[in-house]
Image (tube, coloured by chain):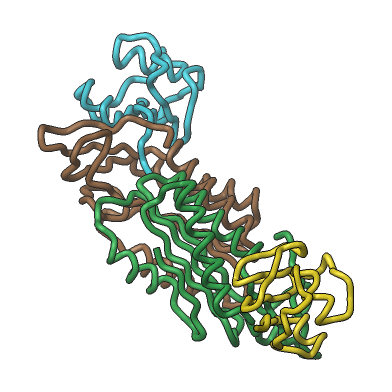
Chain colours: A yellow, B cyan, C brown, D green
Amino acid sequence: MNIRVRLFASLRERLQLDQVELSAEGLTTVADVWQALTGEPWSRQVLAAVNWEYALPETEVKAGDEVAFFPPVTGG
Amino acid sequence: MNIRVRLFASLRERLQLDQVELSAEGLTTVADVWQALTGEPWSRQVLAAVNWEYALPETEVKAGDEVAFFPPVTGG
Amino acid sequence: MAVTLLAKPFDPWAELCAYQERLKRGDYGACASFVGTMRDFNQGDLVEAMFLEHYPGMTERELGRIVGEASARWGFLDALVIHRVGEIRPGDPIVLVAVWSAHRGPAFDACRFIVEALKARVPLWKKEKLPRGVRWVRPSQS
Amino acid sequence: MAVTLLAKPFDPWAELCAYQERLKRGDYGACASFVGTMRDFNQGDLVEAMFLEHYPGMTERELGRIVGEASARWGFLDALVIHRVGEIRPGDPIVLVAVWSAHRGPAFDACRFIVEALKARVPLWKKEKLPRGVRWVRPSQS
């Protein structure tokens, strides 16, 4: 099974990617998913969520999870 | 000319007096007006206003003023 | 700025909506408001009705002074204050305070300041009608 | 408690009024509310329109978590949160937060907490349309 990755706002535009499925193989943490997606090390500018809840770069991920990356929020 | 004195709420009920005109003669301060009205010394339970603005017992009064006495306020 | 004493029931949301029509759309980014409503329970007793006495002349002036102080301190765009006087029933609105500002900080701060100052300073007195008689409400901290 | 995302313009005062009809009259003594509205000016630039992007699924949940945290902390009677998403015009309401409580302290505190937490945590992103192009809004402290 895969991990579904979603991107939002300026991050979505910069990476020109809305959502994608990655094989869960070899992906243990949020930071792993980010690296697999972008080829970049973890960035402190990025916020992450796993299954619609805020997560840290070291938060574990597994097949079937939805992982999201997005910039600082500006609602309200 | 006189000083007009007004009373409100529980104070009005206790003294059974809504408003009254007192001769300004011999009345120099708010505390004087209170004493002339009630025969009592100044009470810290009472709030006073002169011409629709909060006043202290030592605030000066003169003929033509409106002096009011009332209990702590409970609006809002 | 508007400060009004009303001797009849009013709808705070309709007043807010009507007042806001007078403001220029796009200027204000924040409106903080407070509505105080009569409860049917106070200090452990059922309250059937309330009479709100005021000091005509001073009540409006003191409200105006409070709004002026808040305006000088926070520089908001506009404010609306409506306070009931007279006979009030449970569920009736007693007071509306609303402040419009470009940003939320001054709107929240000024709205709360006006409500707290109003409770502390404006010459208004509540007399409650209970099943067993009447009583003057005593000031509280909450 | 109600948390709603809306893709169309709404009237915050009408929503407040309609929601309050569901509450028992006489229970609540205080309603603190906040309405955030789109301005036509930001960071020195004229803003013609705005697009509010969100994360479907997480946005509602995060709003719900914030209201739940506030409820646990202040124990108010009820709360209503409405947030716009999609295309927004200057003067349009963006967010409504309202809290009903017996007394004013918890209503003010919880309302402000929800607004601040919403700004800090809820996955929403504003993109402004200026005369010379578009830009993503950057987070600010005000």
Residue C12: name its quadrant. Answer: bottom left
Name the foreground residue: A20 vs D40.
Answer: A20
Q: Position of residue D10 (x, y in %)?
A: 46, 80
Residue at 77 percent of width and 81 percent of height: A10
As drawn, D8 above or below D94? below
In percent of the image, x 73 and y 59: which residue is there?
Answer: D141
Closer to the camera in the image, A9 or B72? A9
- Total numbered badges shown on the rendered structure: 0
User: Seen in the image, is A36 located left or right of residue D78?
Assistant: right
Q: In this image, B6 relative to D33: left or right? A: left
Residue C43 place in picture, x, y as percent: 27, 34
- In the rendered image, is residue C96 in sight? no
What x and y, as percent, mark residue A57? 77, 64
Residue at position x 34%, y 68% from top?
Answer: D19
Q: Nearer the viewer, residue D83 or B45?
A: D83
Residue D58: give x, y in percent of width and height.
Answer: 57, 73
Name, please, the residue furthest toward the right.
A40
Q: Nearer the viewer, residue A67 or C105?
A: A67
Is residue D32 at least partly visible in the picture?
Answer: yes
From the viewer's perspective, is residue D29 above or below residue D117? above
Image quarter in which the N terminus of chain B is found: top left
Q: Give the quadrant of the C terminus of chain B.
A: top left
Q: Is residue A31 left or right of residue D93?
A: right
